[in-house]
Image (spheres, rainbow, N blue to C red):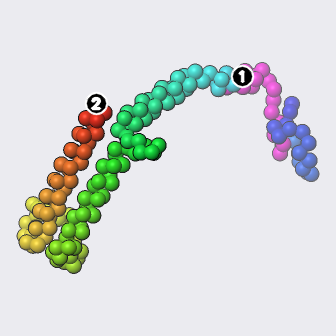
Amino acid sequence: MIPEGGFGRGNVGETAETVGLRSLKTGNLRDYTKKVRALKDTTEQVGKSKYEIDQFNQIKTCLMQFSFDNKGVKTLSVDIIENVMDELRRERKIKMVLADTGIEDYIKLDLEGVTLDTENLDPDVKQVLMDKKKFKDNLCQTVSILRLGYIYKVLK
């Protein structure tokens, strides 16, 4: 019998009950070797891991097709599209400020949960919602054209 913690822990007052002895009976050894063999049999896990790594590399290859090289720095077309969308949003807000179209009132509007289908809408709120819808439609059109351009570039 061998103590679980090994010999020589050196704690004063330790008894056999506190140390906890482990038996080296044949049944325990058989269970232990089964566990060791199960841990060594990792062929299924290795195959799964290789498959996932291969899948990741294929996705990465597809994404790199939608990228541009600028002096050694790769930029994904998705990043470019996000930047274009942000610029268009900023441009819309700048145009509103320059046109001085009631910015103070626009900021104070609470548009949460309000749609064009809502009854008894204030005409100003309705106009703001219509302008937002028109902007979103134009934004979607611009982004779609950009994406088609990138896809065309890849297929070329």
Would you say 27 lies left or right of 43 here? right
Front residue (pair 56, 44): 56
For the N terminus, give its image quadrant: top right
Residue at 78%, 20% in the rendered image:
26
In which image quadrant can residue 116 be found? bottom left
Q: Identify residue for label 2.
A: 155
- Vertical position of residue 97 compared to residue 78: above or below: below
Helix, strand or loop for the magenta stretch, by majority: helix
For the C terminus, give its image quadrant: top left
- Which residues make up the magenta segment? 18-35
Check disc 2 and report its element: helix, strand or loop.
Answer: helix
Residue at 19%, 56% in the rendered image:
136
Mark 2 to mark 1: distance in Å? 56 Å
Q: Identify residue for label 1.
A: 33
Is residue 51 covered in magenta?
no
Residue at 52%, 23% in the rendered image:
47
Check disc 1 and report its element: helix, strand or loop.
Answer: helix
Please rate how many residues cluster around mark 1, counting C-alpha atoms within 10 Å: few if below 14, some from 14 to 19, many from 20.
Answer: few
Question: What amino acid is at disc 1?
Answer: Thr
Q: How many marks?
A: 2
In which image quadrant can residue 38 be found? top right
Give the image location of residue 151, x and y in percent. Answer: 27, 36
Is residue 23 covered in magenta?
yes
Front residue (pair 34, 25): 34
